[in-house]
């Protein structure tokens, strides 16, 4: 490649970035992929070992009669979804497919330790209804539905991946939790409290609270996030797979200031009061003695969100989850990468 060709290529790249940066008036839907894995942080396969989720976030639903009728119908039961609550915008997130996997600490034995958590997987789809009120608070109502057990394909996915990359195979998937439906309803509320740092940067605090009810989990949660950067207005934090500090897919790239690169750093914590966790409580279907679930479970998370114009976003997160059952040998550590694209 000669110098003229190189200059032309870099000019083309610069033009692409500039085009993404000036599309503030556009509001397309966006596709996201979330990958969470304990190997990113601990290089171990144990406990919550893998999560994968694909999703689509709609544009602002202003002027869409069907969707606004659905939100208004929900508002008849939930006051925070009514027009009178000061609607800034409404969006939905559709999850075509997602899967989570759980394994015991030792995966190289064919008969797992009955005192350890059992093998389990959940394959699901879902819908989130996201309403921002007054530009400073967010309501997230979600419904997830799928199958828990061998039909969720946890064994096939983990063994296939390990075979592909040359890792050893898990030996105990024949002892996983049996098939059962997985239906989950959750609600979360977030509120942004913002302090400015000069003309460009800002710091915010986002307290949150929520509840989840279903055949997979039943819990109440409360948490808080802290963020610093130049893109805080865009969202309320990156999304994570439930249960976790409940980030959502909500984002409005029209709020990005000019320029092709933006960022923020984040850290937070969430405490959950667990009344039921099928991946712990159903251990008695695998081993007669079962496990004693811990009622209070805390997550601590931190990371960075990077915005490359309007066409690519990358979130990087590390999470430390407290012990979920008596006898667990240590906290659960895993990392996550979220990638979001324009269609």
Image: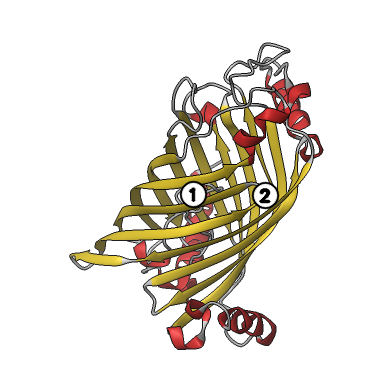
Q: Residue at x 47, y 30 (%)?
A: 332
Q: Is residue 83 visible?
A: yes
- Residue 314, which numbered label? 1
Helix, strand or loop at disc 1?
strand
The residue closer to the viewer here, 158 or 332, is 332
Instruction: Identify the residue at the far left of this view.
Output: 198
Residue 49 position, x and y percent, is 59, 30
Instruction: Compare marks 1 and 2 and give the one earlier in the sequence.
Output: 2
How packed mark 1 is, by other alpha carbons closer than 10 Å (few <14, some 14-19, many 20 or more), is: some
Residue 237 position, x and y percent, is 42, 56
Q: Residue at x 57, y 50 (%)?
A: 218
- Residue 215, which numbered label? 2
Identify whether 32 is placed above or below 77.
above
Quarter of the view holding residue 175: top right
Q: Residue at x 49, y 26 (%)?
A: 326
Instruction: Tell me how far mark 1 sits from mark 2, CA to CA.
Output: 32 Å
Horizontally, residue 209 falls left or right of residue 166, namely left
Helix, strand or loop at disc 2?
loop
The residue closer to the viewer here, 262 or 237, is 237
How packed mark 2 is, by other alpha carbons closer than 10 Å (few <14, some 14-19, many 20 or more), is: some
Q: Residue at x 59, y 21 (%)?
A: 116
Residue 204 position, x and y percent, is 28, 61
Horizontally, residue 151 falls left or right of residue 197, namely right
Residue 252 position, x and y percent, is 47, 69
Quarter of the view holding residue 114: top right
Identify whether 159 is placed above or below 17.
above
Q: Is residue 95 visible?
A: no
Horizontally, residue 204 falls left or right of residue 57, namely left
């Amino acid at each position: 490649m000669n110098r003229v060709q190189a200059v032309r290529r870099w000019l083309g790249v610069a033009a692409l970035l500039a085009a993404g940066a000036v599309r503030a008036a556009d509001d397309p839907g966006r596709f996201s992929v979330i990958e969470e894995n304990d190997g990113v942080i601990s290089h171990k396969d144990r406990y919550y070992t893998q999560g994968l989720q694909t999703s689509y976030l709609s544009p602002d639903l202003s002027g869409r009669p069907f969707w606004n009728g659905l939100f208004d119908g929900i508002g008849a039961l939930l006051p925070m979804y009514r027009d009178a609550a000061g609607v800034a915008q409404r969006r939905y997130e559709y999850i075509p497919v997602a899967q989570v996997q759980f394994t015991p600490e030792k995966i190289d034995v064919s008969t797992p330790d009955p005192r350890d958590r059992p093998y389990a997987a959940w394959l699901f789809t879902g819908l989130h209804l996201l309403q921002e009120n007054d530009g400073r608070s967010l309501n997230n109502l979600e419904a997830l539905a799928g199958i828990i057990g061998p039909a969720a394909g946890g064994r096939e996915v983990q063994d296939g991946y390990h075979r592909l990359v040359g890792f050893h195979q898990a030996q105990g998937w024949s002892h996983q939790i049996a098939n059962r439906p997985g239906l989950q309803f959750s609600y979360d509320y977030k509120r942004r409290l913002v302090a400015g740092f000069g003309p460009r940067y800002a710091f915010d605090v986002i307290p949150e609270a929520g509840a989840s009810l279903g055949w997979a989990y039943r819990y109440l949660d409360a948490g808080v996030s802290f963020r610093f950067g130049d893109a805080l207005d865009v969202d309320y934090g990156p999304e994570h797979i439930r249960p976790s500090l409940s980030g959502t897919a909500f984002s409005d790239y029209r709020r990005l200031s000019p320029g092709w690169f933006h960022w923020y750093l984040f850290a937070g914590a969430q405490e959950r009061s667990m009344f039921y966790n099928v991946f712990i409580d159903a251990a008695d279907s695998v081993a007669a003695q079962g496990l004693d679930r811990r009622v209070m479970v805390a997550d601590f998370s931190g990371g960075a969100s990077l915005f490359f114009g309007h066409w690519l976003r990358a979130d990087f997160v590390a999470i430390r989850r407290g012990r979920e059952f008596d006898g667990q040998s240590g906290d659960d550590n895993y990392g996550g990468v979220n990638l979001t694209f324009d269609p």
